């Protein structure tokens, strides 16, 4: 994607993500993508090197956006509400860019070689951001310690990531309300006995 201007690259990635989410990466073709973009297939290949470049770019954009948002919140918020704010930032990013995130989650396996290693590295780095926050709250007595930080983090990510597939924008919860609901379910369930009472008092 490095041959395309930022605006063109964004349009290509957004359109490709919608196509890959709808048809699946393997079934979607660059001819279909060119038609959706209203350009010639040869013009599309002027901007991209290969179809896998698109998937790689989508995965990097997905992980980049969610990591930036969550790390920014982690830097801005302190105290017992920090992890809750990080959870809300994750959900809001996931629901704002559902096509990008769903393609990253389901089609990551289609990447190969250095592209796969690059995206797996970014994914693992993001998981470490959340795990570090969980470990921090465990050390402060806010989260239970009878479960490992790793398992708590994986349970949290599973809960947050699946919102992409079942959330209904026309339903009875906004993205912010859903984020607060999920953070409450996780944090109430994972809270240490003493922290449960303090959390109930704050909310």
Image (spheres, rainbow, N blue to C red):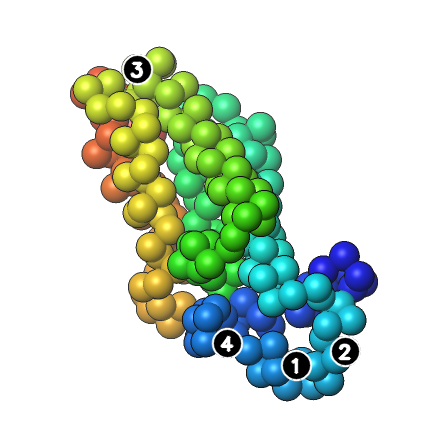
The secondary element bearing badge 1 is classed as: helix
Quarter of the rendering containing residue 34: bottom right
Image coordinates for residue 1, horizontal then vertical, percent: 72, 60
The answer to whether residue 114 is above or below residue 24 is above
Q: Are marks 4 and 3 in contact (CB under 8 Å)?
A: no
Q: Residue furthest front?
A: 113
Which mark identifies residue 67?
A: none
Which mark identifies residue 34?
A: 1
Instruction: Name the residue tied to disc 3.
Output: 141
The secondary element bearing badge 2 is classed as: helix
> Marks 3 and 1: which is nearer the front?
1
The secondary element bearing badge 4 is classed as: loop
Q: CA distance from mark 2 to mark 3?
A: 57 Å
Which class describes the residues within 10 Å of circle 3: few (<14), some (14-19), or many (20+)? Answer: some
Q: Are marks 2 and 1 in contact (CB under 8 Å)?
A: yes
Q: Are marks 1 and 4 in contact (CB under 8 Å)?
A: no
Image coordinates for residue 121, horizontal then vertical, percent: 52, 38
Which class describes the residues within 10 Å of circle 1: few (<14), some (14-19), or many (20+)? Answer: some
* Residue 127 appears in the picture as rendered: yes
Q: CA distance from mark 4 to mark 2?
A: 18 Å
Which mark identifies residue 28?
A: 4
| Residue drawn at the location 29% of the way across and 31% of the way down | 152
| Residue drawn at the location 51% of the way across and 55% of the way down | 111
Q: CA distance from mark 2 to mark 1?
A: 8 Å
> Marks 2 and 3: which is nearer the front?
2
Instruction: Name the residue tied to disc 2.
Output: 43
Mark 1 or 4, nearer chain start: 4
Mark 2 or 1, nearer chain start: 1
């Amino acid at each position: 994607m490095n041959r395309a201007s930022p605006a063109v690259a964004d349009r290509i990635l957004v359109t490709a993500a919608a196509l890959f989410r709808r048809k699946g990466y393997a079934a979607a073709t660059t001819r279909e993508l060119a038609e959706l973009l209203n350009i010639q297939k040869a013009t599309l290949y002027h901007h991209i090197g290969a179809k896998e470049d698109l998937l790689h770019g989508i995965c990097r954009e997905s992980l980049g956006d969610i990591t930036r948002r969550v790390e920014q919140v982690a830097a801005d918020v302190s105290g017992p509400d920090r992890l809750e704010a990080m959870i809300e930032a994750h959900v809001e990013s996931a629901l704002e860019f559902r096509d990008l995130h769903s393609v990253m989650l389901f089609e990551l396996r289609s990447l190969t070689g250095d592209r796969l290693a690059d995206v797996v590295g970014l994914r693992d780095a993001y998981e470490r951001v959340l795990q570090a926050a969980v470990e921090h709250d465990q050390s402060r007595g806010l989260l239970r310690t009878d479960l490992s930080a790793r398992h708590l983090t994986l349970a949290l990510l599973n809960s947050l990531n699946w919102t992409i597939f079942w959330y209904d924008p026309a339903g009875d919860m906004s993205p912010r309300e859903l984020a607060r609901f999920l953070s409450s379910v996780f944090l109430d369930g994972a809270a240490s006995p003493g922290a449960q009472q303090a959390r109930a008092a704050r909310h």
